[in-house]
Amino acid sequence: MKSIDYVSYIKRLKAESGVNSLLEILTMKSLFIEMFFDEQKLSSGTAFLAANDTQSHCALITNRHNVTGRNQDTNECLSRLCATPNNIVIYFHKGGSIGEWHKVKLPLYRDNGEPFWIEDPLLGAKADVVALNLNWGSDVNKLAYYMKTTLDRDNLYVGPSDTVSVIGFPFGISSFGKFPVWATGFMAQELLLMTKDNPVFLIDCRARQGQSGSPVVAYRSGGYRTINGNEISPVISGAPKWEFLGIYSGRVNSESDLGRVWHVSVIERILDAAERDYQHRYKSIKDNQ
């Protein structure tokens, strides 16, 4: 894991973006998205950017059911219009600024009908996580969750009943403009009880429709615990710290506040697969020129 000085990085990022120094970086990382069939809006949800480090390509990460428009378990159409999306609109912060938004519209399918999104190379369509696009222009502010640095992943210990936050847009609601809402709940299980075939864990949180695709983080201010092997150590700090845990995928059923979160390890795999796909297609284009 690449170590980066957190305080210096946050100060530089806020200075470059002209953002109020009291606004949390995580508030800027969740992105409002809308799914359309042609010009007909079908639904809204949440997405975020992910990258390996500050020099890597950024991919847009969201739930698979957001882009397919179908229930992951039953394959039933989610829209009351019985339509599935063919394009997605993402509300980015404008390049070089925060609090002004730039809409980017992307098709979800190629001309041959093949999806643009990349799925988990291990679990495929079973994983409710996809990556879209690695090539963004300077007109958008690329605020990502980093997989291989200590900025968003620093071995914070998160145990049962510890608080976690789902940062997204319930029912399409924002706190201001297109800034997200923080919904906070609790870990409902041990992370160690996940399996490779089912890298999903449960949280107890009042998340609702529209928060599908939200990043899930353990946010700590004033102190936290780290884990190294079997040793858990307390840390007192004046700066906030967080651990990026995964992507929220929805409640287990409509009667429960228990929600599924796909673990960050799935996002790591999909991000690497998206990078390989991007490089393969770029090479093919160059070879055919």
Image: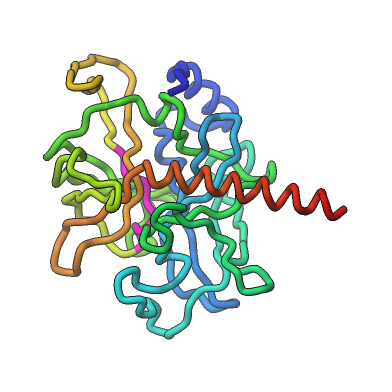
Query: Quarter-wise, where is residue 80 in the image?
Result: bottom left
Q: Give whichever of 161, 262 is nearer the camera.
A: 262
Extreme residue in the right direction: 289
Residue 216 in magenta?
yes
Range covered by the magenta-colored residues: 210-217
At 37% from the left edge and 56% from the top edge, which residue is drawn?
169
Residue 191 in magenta?
no
Report whether 99 appears left or right of 24: right
Q: Give whichever of 139, 270 is nearer the camera.
A: 270
Residue 181, horizontal then vertical, whole percent? 34, 49
Tell me: residue 261, above or below residue 233.
below
Count of numbered circles on the image? 0
Q: Give whichever of 285, 139 is nearer the camera.
A: 285
**Magenta span: chief secondary structure:** loop
Residue 256, horizontal then vertical, whole percent? 14, 63
Report whether 166 appears left or right of 147: left
Quarter holding the N terminus? top left
Residue 123, horizontal then vertical, whole percent? 39, 56
Tell me: residue 118, above or below residue 76.
above
Query: Quarter-wise, where is residue 158 in the image?
Result: top left
At 62% from the left edge and 66% from the top edge, which residue is drawn?
107
Tell me: residue 86, above or below residue 215.
below
At 47% from the left edge and 24% from the top edge, which residue is drawn?
10
Q: Give whichever of 38, 277 is nearer the camera.
A: 277
Residue 108, horizontal then vertical, whole percent? 58, 66
Report whether 243 appears left or right of 57: left
Say how the picture is coloured.
rainbow
At 23% from the left edge and 15% from the top edge, which residue is drawn?
235
